[in-house]
Structures are given as C-alpha cells and as structure tokens.
Amino acid sequence: MFTLYYTPHTCSLASHIALEDAGAAYALKRIDFDTEEQKSADYVAINPKARVPIMATPRGLLSETPAMLAFIAQSFPEAKLAPLDDAFAFAEMQSFNSYLCSTLHVAHAHRMRGHRWADEPASFADMQRKVPQSVGAAFELIDRLLLKGPWVMGEAYTVADPYLFTLAQWLEADGVDPARIPRVIEHRARMAALPNVRKAIAEELAP
C-alpha cells in the first residue's frame, strides 16, 4: 500500500498516473497550497523539503519524481513501465526524467517561485521574462531529439510518459508557442486520451 501526498496542478500527477498504470494499491493525501499546508509542522515532519510529491511506501518515504517513478516501475515489473531488462535503456529513461526534473521544471518554476533564487522583486520580473525562452528551449530539445515517438522511449510506454505529459500541461501558461513543438503536443493529446490519465486527473481535481 502506498500513500501519495499530492497537490493538483503539480508534478505529483506523474506519480499518480504511474500508480494507476502499475495497478498499485494506493491512497491519496491532498496538501493544500492555498493555506501553505506544505509548510506546516505536521507535513514538514513527513517531508522536510516542504514540497510535493512525497510517497509513503512499506519501505519508507520517497521524494523526487524521478526516484518515485523508477521505484513504481521496479516494484511492479509485470506492468512493464520501464525497460528493466536493459540497463542502458533504463539509464536513458532516467536521463530523460532527470532532464525534466533538473532543467525543464526548474525553468518553469522561475515564473512563480522566484523567491527560491532571489530577494528583489526586480529579479523576479527578470526571471519571469526569461521563462518563455528557457522553457521553450527545453521543450524544443525534447521535440527535436529526445522524444522518440510515439512514446518518450519509442514504441514502449514508460513512466517517462506521464512525467512529460504532466509538465506539458503548463507550457502555454509559460508562454511557449505549441506550434513550435508539434510532437510534444501530439504526445500530450495521446496521453490525455488514456483512461488512467483521465482517472488520475479527475481524482486530483475532485472537491
């Protein structure tokens, strides 16, 4: 049994979809950003990073989306959510997920979380002006070179797919022109049509 601590419209959706894909038994615990519940003593006792997602497992707590996705794939090998029998292909998938985490998501966060990197409001504004360029460049690289198609790794769906889908939800708000990244947009539409994706989104948005 797993418990996923999540907030709607965050990268927790990727692990939520992966749990559905794996057929895992899991529970959801919503963390309310509007009341800054992520900074509360109770939540910080669970996750000192004061962020979502984090996942409680029978072995302990896991944070950071690439690690959580890899753990889900490895815990349910029958679901075939990663190339577990191919060390190089698995590392390729991890490389892709790490790029989403360390580069694309960080560039996106400069639009609304400039306080993580600076103190002056003028600095926040400068970061926000850069977001369409930095996020757009990351998506263009994915579109041109990293997305093998029809899924991230090629013919086989993996946990990299819900992760890319989750971050692609935000690209218009980041000022990225969808016409520049047609393959990413096609992938997003392909993912949006999947029952497990629709179910996870509905669960997160439910009152």
Image (tube, rainbow, N blue to C red):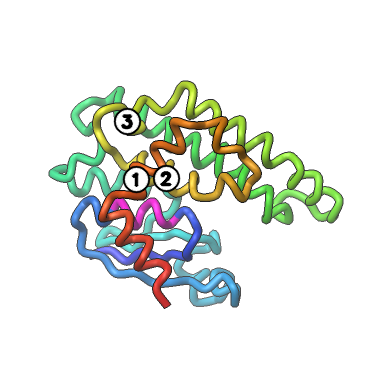
Viewer-side residue, 186 vs 174: 186
Instruction: Say what secondary structure mark 3 lies in.
Output: loop
Mark 1: secondary structure: helix
Give the structural element (helix, strand or loop) at label 2. helix
Q: Are marks 1 and 3 in contact (CB under 8 Å)?
A: no
| Between discs 2 and 1, the one toward the N terminus | 2
Foreground residue among 61 and 134: 134
Marks 2, 1: nearer the viewer: 1
Tag 2: residue type?
Phe
In magenta, the rendered stretch is: 12-18
Residue picked out by circle 2 = 165
Q: Label 1, on which residue?
A: 191
Task: Residue type at mark 3: give it.
Answer: Pro
Q: Where is 54 relative to 67, above or below?
A: below
| Residue at image coords 44%, 59% | 53
For the C terminus, the quadrant is bottom left
Residue 64 position (above or below residue 139): below
Predominant secondary structure, magenta span: helix
How crowded is the residue under tag 2: few (<14 C-alpha within 10 Å), some, or many (20+)?
A: many
Residue appearing at x 36%, y 66% in the figure: 202
Looking at the image, residue 202 sits to the left or right of residue 72; the answer is right
Q: CA distance from mark 3 to mark 2?
A: 13 Å
Disc 2 vs disc 1: Cβ atoms closer than 8 Å? yes
> How many C-alpha atoms fall within 10 Å of the one at disc 1: few (<14), some, or many (≥20)?
some
Question: Mark 3 highlights which residue?
Answer: 150
